[in-house]
Image (cartoon, rainbow, N blue to C red):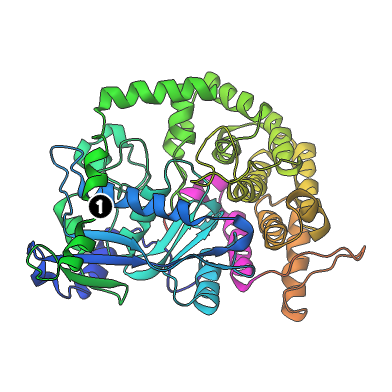
Amino acid sequence: MLHSRLPLVVSIASSLLVACSHDIGSQNIGSQDIVREHRLTFAANSELGITEATLDDIIREMNTIVRRPDYAWDAPCGHVRFVKSGTLVARADLPVAGPFEHQVKQLRKLAPSANVLLVSSVGCGKVASAAGCANIGAEPSIMALNSPGYEALTVLHERGHNMGLPHSAESPTVDRQVSEQVGMRYMFWRLGQGHLGQISRECEGFSKPLYPSITSLRGTGSSDPLVVAAAFSSVTDLEESPMAPSRAKLETRQSQAARSAGLTARAYAVIAPPLLEGELPLAEISALDKEDLESIRNLLRGTPNSYWLNACYVLAIAGGPGDVELIENTLTRPITPSTTTSLQGSKPDHISKAGLIALKVGAADSLGMIANRISRLNSQVAKSAVNTLFKVAHIDQASMILGKGQAALSLSRGAQRALSLPQTRESRAFVTRILKSTETAGFHGIDSSGLEFAPLEREDIANMNLNMLELQQRDIISYLKLKR
Ligand SMILES: [Zn+2]
């Protein structure tokens, strides 16, 4: 993505610059009388079937996390509050997956009142199926509903970036290997169990009236009882919420969850948390041993669930030629999503519609990555992966996998984009042809047999061009490690 406004600027220095340049109204911080209310207006494609109850659950949990001290060092943001503004803006033409810049553009065009777009996955960084993405110091944020249990933390993390907050530490830092005060914050570069803390500087970040969506309410000093009630209505929710468990308890809980998923504890720790901003935990993936990887393969031989998305990414990075078939099956097999729950896909043993689209787009991405890695080792298997991607790139095939609609178009685009990764003779020829044809045919590809591909967006093309250029010069792991 060669745009000047990069999603999630990872450099701390530049983030601080943004934060400082918007230091408006911070003189009120510390005053118990002022409550900063963030009015979040959500928008989503109607295909995703998101309910108001889901949004209410997310908002409630966000308020609990920012206001409750979970650790001795955790600074409760008593003067920060999130509310849902209006009802979900649902439209059939909003994006469900695809590049971040395109999603932002479409949101501004189709639902300009919204400041949070809910999708199934977002192309952020070098990963096509990430769980969240945002600009530092600018609305909106994109939140993908593909990681059960992490929804509220993801919105909070991305909203934190909107408010100018940088990460508490960058990749490849591992949360358990740094101080709790760094590793257990929701602004850590990747989320994980117990990432519930914040420091006072982060509360201050949420206290800046940067956007019209942030209103200042009088708190305890207000003479208007309605305003006071509105500002503190979530206090009862806080009292009912349990404190964050100790690290020892977290470890126990994590190994129980791993066992019930049939994964080793280490495989679970890598797979369960969402891929924020598309940043892959490469150090943790490369530390997985044979037993860990075998548990991930077994997972992909069982019943589809929400862990499959990251399982595919792990095998793309650490697997061998024998794993191509598992990823191909994940991409092409028909999967029925579970019916709507109050929180989309909140049970890891099921898969929501949003989770399913994310899985398919992510499986295409993973297939492109693994094909690149193994092409010298086993050219026949790489060729098979490329053929599968080529088939799925046709709208007809993508529609058979996900049904007709935005989701199938996203998958067709995702498969075309993934073909810029393998760098086999066939994939290069295909991508070169596509990129050439887009110059004249309005980004709309039809192959020699008359079969149709979904029209590519400008951002897809920029992304494919970048992949083609970079992957001629370096191997895919070095490419993924490159900071943007
Ligand atoms: Zn982040």
The residue where tag 1 is placed is 234
User: In this picture, is 350 found above or below 230?
Assistant: above
Q: Residue at x 64, y 59 (%)?
A: 47
Find the residue positioned furthest to the front.
Answer: 225
Instruction: Residue 244: give x, y in percent of width and height.
Output: 25, 34
For label 1, the SS is loop
Q: How many numbered discs, if any? A: 1
Q: Which residues are magenta?
A: 457-482
User: Does the magenta-highlighted stretch encompass residue 176?
Assistant: no
Instruction: Residue 159: give x, y in percent of width and height.
Output: 34, 60
Q: Residue at x 80, y 38 (%)?
A: 380
User: In this picture, is 478 found above or below 327?
Assistant: below
Find the residue positioned furthest to the right.
Answer: 449
Looking at the image, residue 365 sits to the left or right of residue 149; the answer is: right
Looking at the image, residue 370 sits to the left or right of residue 51; the answer is: right
Q: Is residue 8 visible?
A: yes
Label 1 CB-ligand 1 distance < 8 A: no
Q: Residue at x 23, y 35 (%)?
A: 243
User: Does the magenta-highlighted stretch encompass residue 477?
Assistant: yes
Three-letter code, disc 1: Ser
Q: Residues within 10 Å of mark 1 (few under 14, many from 20)?
A: some
Question: Which residue is more in the foreground, 303 or 475?
Answer: 303
Q: Main secondary structure of the magenta part?
A: helix
User: In this picture, is 481 found above or below 104?
Assistant: above
Q: Is residue 179 visible?
A: no
- Which quadrant of the rendered structure holds the C terminus? bottom left
